[in-house]
Image (tube, rainbow, N blue to C red):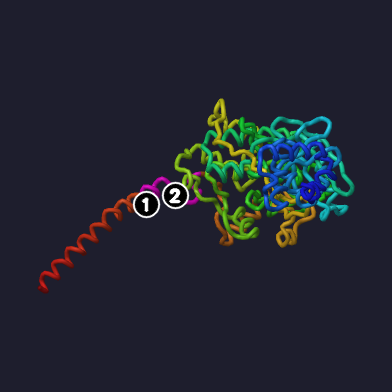
């Protein structure tokens, strides 16, 4: 038993101040009382039992146990104790934590030390100050911010449940009613932000958090910008966002910042919710950017036959390539979705959060999923001053006139196949083949039999 008390795990546990000697002794006594601890052949096996017991007692979480076992002793950021790892946002890792004195569970976004350049710190500080200006039930609220040594962090409310992307990937596409409820709530939150002069610029399924009760909160304002910020915006003139949800005008004229760009991204998100597919799957970032400008997605009924014409038209109006003809506001989105929003939302059974004990420590370098700089696309010459939406559309129409794909409105008649007529044709062909193929086999067998009889 002396060897067990001298393991890396026990030393790290005591050094972290998450566990005291009394708790370790109690855990050992429980294991001994249950029998079998002294009979384990290796100290490492006893260490695993001890760690599991401390987790069972509620002294440690699975994530903390794994970090301590690997010899890490710092599991706090200021007064916040890290208890789990959630994933990553646009600028860093996101952890679950508990305030030492208040006992309140929160989420903490951490700017990795490897990215803590003066520019990154200024951008992160800007995100903190931006989020602090907002207070709405459909937006993730900011509680606190600070730095621990050279590690900067933002503290927000912890939203139990999952995000829309994970929900669809694990449970499949949503119904029209479920999709309408989720997107309508997101639109309410975005509408509030737009009224404050703020454009999100990275609306996507991964940034819509859904609680088990069906409450939706928009998260991750790391790329947000103010409508009248102009050249003071550190990302002015850059294409920012995530490739699957980029509005055409953000690609052709990145200086052009408007709330209707969020509406386009929200339309792409609605398309994903009801079909389980992104509008333009496959290809490189450059391919996706081109297709947002020049092509129309597959008809939603290709993936969900229950989608009505009216619902498809609504998606199309949100994904209109011409910003002048697109739905003009989040309030309009809410009004258009209202007929499908149920009085009480029933979502698929949400899987509980899977604690990732082997997640990275606090903090570490990560690879961003959100694309802030589109490299070659951003190197294309652009005018120094913002260009009006009319000029953006004119540029796109000239491109189409030179042989590019049609940039007409993306209504249900102009989504890619299948239309109702083509569906009926394909179904008739399939029925004919279903009959013809077996008949042809029978006919062939009969002819073969007759031929063999003739030879006899």
Task: Tell me if residue 13 is in the magenta stretch.
Answer: no
Instruction: Tell me the residue at 75%/57% (across/down).
Output: 382
Residue at which label 1 appears: 426
Task: Inspect the magenta stretch and tell me whether residue 416 lies in it.
Answer: yes
Q: Quadrant of the C terminus?
A: bottom left
User: Could you tell me which secondary element the residue under label 1 belongs to?
Assistant: helix
What residue would you read off at disc 2? Answer: 418
287 on left or right of 362: left
Residue range highlighted in magenta: 412-424
- Residue 268 position in % (x across, y down): 60, 45
- Pointer 2 with pointer 1, Cβ within 8 A: yes
Q: Residues within 10 Å of mark 1 (few under 14, many from 20)?
A: few
Comparing 170 with 291, the one in front is 170
Give the x, y percent position of residue 447: 17, 66
Which quarter of the figure has residue 433? bottom left
Please state which of residues 435 and 96 is positioned toward the viewer in this rendering.
96
């Amino acid at each position: 038993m002396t060897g067990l008390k001298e393991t890396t795990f026990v030393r790290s546990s005591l050094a972290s101040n998450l566990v005291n000697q009394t708790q370790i002794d109690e855990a050992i006594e429980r294991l001994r009382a249950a029998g079998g601890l002294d009979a384990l052949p290796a100290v490492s096996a006893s260490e695993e039992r001890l760690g599991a017991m401390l987790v069972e007692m509620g002294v440690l979480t699975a994530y903390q146990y794994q970090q301590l076992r690997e010899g890490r002793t710092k599991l706090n950021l200021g007064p916040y104790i890290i208890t789990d790892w959630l994933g990553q946002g646009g600028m860093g890792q996101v952890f679950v934590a508990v305030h030492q004195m208040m006992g309140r569970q929160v989420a903490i976004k951490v700017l990795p030390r490897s990215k803590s350049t003066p520019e990154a710190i200024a951008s992160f500080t800007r995100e903190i100050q931006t989020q602090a200006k907002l207070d709405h039930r459909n937006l993730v609220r900011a509680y606190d911010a600070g730095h621990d040594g050279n590690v900067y962090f933002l503290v927000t409310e912890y939203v139990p449940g999952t995000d829309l992307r994970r929900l669809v990937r694990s449970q499949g596409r949503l119904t029209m009613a479920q999709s309408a409820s989720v997107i309508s709530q997101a639109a309410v939150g975005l509408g509030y932000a737009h009224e404050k002069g703020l454009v999100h610029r990275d609306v996507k399924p991964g940034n819509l958090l859904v609680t088990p009760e069906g409450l939706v909160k928009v998260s991750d304002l790391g790329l947000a910008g103010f409508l009248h910020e102009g050249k003071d915006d550190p990302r002015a003139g850059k294409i920012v966002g995530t490739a699957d949800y980029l509005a055409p005008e953000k690609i052709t004229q990145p200086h052009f910042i408007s709330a209707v760009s969020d509406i386009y991204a929200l339309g792409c998100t609605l398309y994903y919710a009801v079909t389980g597919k992104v509008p333009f799957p496959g290809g490189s970032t450059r391919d996706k950017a081109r297709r947002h400008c020049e092509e129309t997605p597959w008809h939603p009924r290709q993936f969900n036959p229950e989608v009505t014409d009216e619902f498809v038209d609504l998606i199309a109006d949100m994904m209109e390539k011409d910003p002048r003809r697109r739905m003009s506001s989040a309030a309009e989105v809410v009004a258009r979705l209202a007929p499908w929003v149920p009085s009480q939302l029933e979502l698929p059974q949400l899987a509980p959060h899977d604690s990732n004990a082997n997640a990275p420590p606090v903090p570490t370098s990560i690879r961003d999923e959100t694309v802030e700089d589109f490299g070659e696309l951003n190197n294309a010459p652009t005018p120094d001053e913002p260009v009006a939406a009319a000029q953006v559309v004119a540029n796109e129409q000239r491109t189409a006139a030179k042989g590019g794909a049609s940039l007409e409105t993306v209504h249900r008649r102009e989504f890619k196949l299948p239309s109702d007529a083509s569906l009926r044709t394909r179904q008739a062909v399939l029925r004919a083949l279903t009959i013809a193929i077996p008949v042809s086999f029978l006919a062939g067998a009969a002819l073969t039999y007759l031929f063999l009889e003739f030879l006899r």
